Amino acid sequence: MRMWTQPALVLALLALAPRARAADPGPLPVTVETGVKVPMRDGVTLVADVYRPRTEGRFPVLLQRTPYDRRDPQTGLRLASHGYVVVLQDTRGRFDSGGEFYPFRSEAADGYDTVEWAAALPYADGRVGMFGGSYVGATQMLAAMAKPPHLVAIQPYVTASEYYEGWTYQGGALMEWFVTSWSSGLAVDTLRRKAAELSRPRDWVEATPMESYRLLDLPPVPDLAPYLRDWMHHETRDAYWKATRVSDHYGEMTVKGLHQAGWHDIFSRGSIENYMGLRDKAATPEARAGQRLLVGPWAHWSTSHEGKVGDVVFGKDAVVDGNDLLLQWAAFALKGEANAYATGAPVRLFVMGDNVWRDEQEFPLARARATRYYLHAAKGANSLGGDGRLGTDPPRTERPDRFDYDPADPVRTLGGRLCCGAAYPPGPADQRPNESRRDVLVYSTPPLAKDLEVTGFITAEIQAATSAVDTDFTAMLADVDPSGYARYLADGIVRARYRHSRETAEPIEPGRVETYAVDLWATSNVFKAGHRLRLYVSSSNFPRFDRNPNTGESTAASARMVKAQQTVYHDAARPSALILPVVPRP
């Protein structure tokens, strides 16, 4: 299956065009060349389709390098008709391109070679822009890292800033559902390529049901995605990951960038970090000034026509034509048009709760105030039936909360920042099914007397001890309406042995109180009057993250599980708190 068809993903996730629009001379006739061979420096040949205006002149290039099948005439024809040479290319080892696919490894060099090849086309004017989301965003960031001279602009959306933290691991825990489901989807084309190597015709390969492939002479299943095995063996941020760590190279990049993120997207933090890093560190003043950020309520999956993400309808303003958005960005970044990208605010945020767009001059917001909401409980915060409370009043003398974490019976994932596959749909979801569990601590504010806006990065500082030699602590923030519906907003996890560093595992001492800083990434939400803020603290969120067996064994070598007795402290000497960026409101 194709993990993301380009029209569906673009229309679903690129959701807001600037208000001002440049004059459009109308569509141009288009010439299409399919199966164009593009040589790489190591002799491998990649394959692209080229769409170009059927008229005299030279035009900027819009390049997309994708592992999800380049064949997308709807996008190619539309963009080319507006005065661009459009190059849609299969990345190395995918579909019609040669070589072996291994995520990220060849994208910098292949991106450089393709950009320079495209810039030299006889009908190109030498300016190249790249576009696309998810892994297609990674192909842009890695190409920009290689600094091809003719790459002028990028438009990466819902993508990461590195491929350890926020793509494969988060807080030291494996992002299990994503890495396994994504790799499984990619393996389908690998199977088909292996069948083609047996001289099967392409039509047969594409039409044959996947269950028939067991009859063929194919490699063992692990060999279909060897990188997944490597990812599990490299569970620290070691030299394996450094070679493709984009965030180390912001200071060398010279591209303008339109960075698009979704509050409910699995790569939301990375998209925001790419904007912030290039805004602050890009190699030239023009590149630093040329960064834009757009964050909507989106997840990594389709957004309906009425703007529904997960359980929530955010309204039609959250959805527009993504190709139109791209055309306006390209008009500014590649053609120099003085449209809204030249004159407007650099940041646009969708503020949930109010469900409106707002222009900002920076992110995070300078006017936001870090506000501590302390954890409190008298009798105990276990489940919604406990008396867990969130408040800005610091704790005094309070007994700790305790729960048992059994990795054989983990807390199940309900919505959130997920990808890929229908079994676990992403986006805001009701957390009430988990509120009756004794291994979920629940802390809530009283109903709010007035609206409260939270916009920016969120952290939970949990003072805790465990009986195990290693364990996890999780935190999740929800917006609870008067009916009791608990809408997911943000979540995070920290693996105890990586509490201080992702580079080095540090053992913990059973029973010793430690500070666990859980990064919940960012959101923008107005908790309306009458609503409650609710924080859940536990030790699992499965299968979004892998279960910690509490044994201290590595992710790849784990073979047994033990229960852990967890203690969460919230007293004057050991206060636990949720730290929120509260934005003053009129």
Image (cartoon, rainbow, N blue to C red):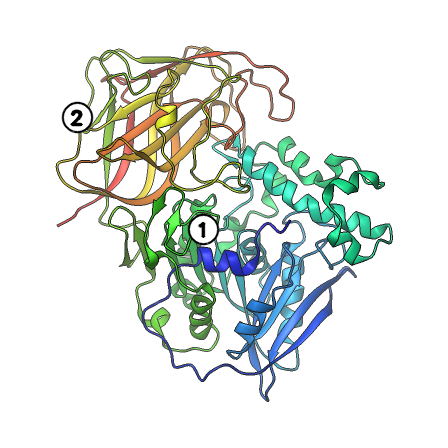
Q: Nearer the viewer, residue 232 or 543?
A: 543
Query: SS at mark 2?
Result: loop
Q: Amino acid at mark 2?
A: Asp
The reply to whether callout 2 and callout 1 are in contact (CB within 8 Å) is no
Where does residue 207 sit, x and y in percent of width and height?
A: 74, 53
Disc assigned to residue 393: 2
Taking the image as drawn, is residue 414 in sight? yes
In the shown orientation, is residue 20 left or right of residue 583? right
User: In the rendered image of this protein, does residue 431 appear above or below residue 272?
Assistant: above
Q: Quadrant of residue 427?
A: top left
In the shown orientation, is residue 30 left or right of residue 101? left
Taking the image as drawn, is residue 251 in sight? no
Q: Amino acid at mark 1?
A: Ser
Q: Residues within 10 Å of mark 2 (few under 14, many from 20)?
A: few
Q: Residue at 26% across / 11% down in the picture?
A: 399
Q: Nearer the viewer, residue 456 or 295?
A: 295
| Number of numbered callouts drawn | 2
Name the residue tied to disc 1. 271
User: In the rendered image of this protein, does residue 246 appear above or below residue 516?
Assistant: below
User: What is the distance, in whole Å, between disc 2 and disc 1 at their CAs?
Assistant: 35 Å
Where does residue 25 sit, x and y in percent of width and height?
A: 44, 84
Q: Residues within 10 Å of mark 1 (few under 14, many from 20)?
A: many
Query: SS at mark 1?
Result: helix
